[in-house]
Amino acid sequence: MPNSKVEGSTYSLASFISNIPLNDIPSEILHESKRTLINVLAISLSGTQEIPSKALINWASTQNASPRATAIGGLRTSPSIAALLNGYLAHIQDFDDTHLPTILHPSAPVWPAVLALAELNRTNGKETLAAFALGAEVECRVAMSVYPWHYDHGWHITGTAGVFGAAAGGGRVLGLAPEVMNHCLAMAGTHASGLREALGSHAKAMHPARSAAIGLESAELALSGMTGPEDILGGRRGFWAIHSHEGHSESQLLDGFGQRWEMKNNGLKPFANGIVAHPLQDAIIQVRNTYGITSEQVESLTFRVNPLVVELMGRASPRTGFDGKFSYRHCVAVGLIDGAGGAFQFTDERVMDAEVIRLRSLISETIDPEVKEDSTHLTVKLKDGKAIELFIEHAIGTPENPMTDQDLEIKFMSLATEVMPKTQAQQLLDAAWSLDSAHNLESLMNLVSL
């Protein structure tokens, strides 16, 4: 299709992804991309031990796919299946990064598509980081163009917007020209899916998994000559019209693209659960550590919270570990008892623990729309009559209070050494930090095998 005849929002996006020079991507954005990769590697390694992950890995191993790409854990399989597996592993524990303005998880759909294609095509490390940065920017912009209408209607935005990011990142690795990139985004966008009803189940992580695989396949098919609709976003029956019929914002998609980077609004998680509960967990763990209180001393715990805490995390009586990730009461209870919010705190056994259940019953909230999503006010009433109050302005792990590189390294080593020797984990961490100087991904991907 001649360039002069192509128009629309999708083509504007495609043209930018294809044409922006590598050197125009700020070094701070490439560094943040590197941080997201380190985070993804850590949580994916830990995620290999989850029961549904083992089921998916076992399924993949029976497909007899051509071994051309590496899944975290070491399975050699097709690029598409590797992207699927890695997308699942990156999200199964809900320990992955979150774009605060939209509650999108940027890395889980995009990094798996980029890694598989970059490994296959022996792309150098800096170009790989750039491909991720652009893919993440695309999915965040798509998410912002439909948030909150789309999300409020019940779509899981990580699946629906994520497919565009995976396609953009994969297409950048393959060097797609703007017209071809437009078709890549079009083919991916027609598969945009994922329902919030799946939250708290094994199925939720399939949203970024499928997005990663579809994005990768769309890039390869577009390169092979397959075409899609001209404007999958803005067309009469396109993404905006069907997935967000109550409203959308084209300016959020395109304005300031390349000057204002949404990666700056992304946060790495210190806790393995829904991010809107993180201020509450931060608060209770600070109180626990500062005052040395135990669950036996507590008469009540009351939080003043943003409405999304109850909307997304209001499950009062979770029955499984995955349920617990969407129960702010459970997150707070184990935060006080254990001083943590990792994988151990979200097992079926921990959710059904008698003391955890008792403490959950003492926790309540007051909804206040004026409270920001990364803030909370906590009042702890003790049985001896004393009261403790704490205000969290910005929870740890949010853009205004980010995890430092040192915090990230601690998280990485803690999770990676669950499944691999410390020496190998350190080598993998070093390879990720130095990715921008790597000629290809061979060394990095060799180190993810268990």
Image (cartoon, rainbow, N blue to C red):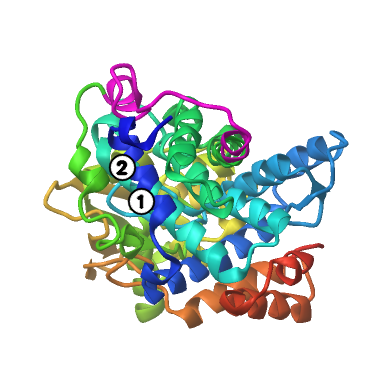
Which quarter of the figure is the N terminus placed in?
top left
Image height of 438 relative to 70, above or below: below
Residue 158: image quadrant is top left
Task: Using residue 88 as the reference point, say whether residue 36 is left or right of it.
Answer: left
The amino acid pointed to by label 2 is: Ser
Residue closer to the observer: 171 or 360? 171
Tag 2, which secondary structure?
helix
Span of residues in magenta? 219-244
Give the residue drawn at x 35%, y 51%.
Answer: 16
Which quarter of the figure is the C terminus placed in?
bottom right
Give the residue drawn at x 50%, y 36%.
Answer: 184
Task: Using residue 227 as the reference point, say whether residue 416 is left or right of it.
Answer: right
Q: Main secondary structure of the magenta part?
A: loop
Residue lying furthest top in this view? 237
The amino acid pointed to by label 1 is: Phe
Q: Residues within 10 Å of mark 1 (few under 14, many from 20)?
A: some
**Residue 114 place in picture, x, y as percent:** 59, 53
Label 2 vs label 1: CA separation? 6 Å
**Residue 110 place in picture, x, y as percent:** 52, 50
Which residue is label 1 attached to?
Answer: 16
Disc 2 and disc 1 in contact, CB within 8 angstroms: yes
Q: Residues within 10 Å of mark 2 (few under 14, many from 20)?
A: some
**Residue 221 place in picture, x, y as percent:** 61, 33
**Residue 321 place in picture, x, y as percent:** 58, 44
Which residue is label 2 attached to?
Answer: 12
Residue closer to the observer: 434 or 396? 434
Tag 1, which secondary structure?
helix
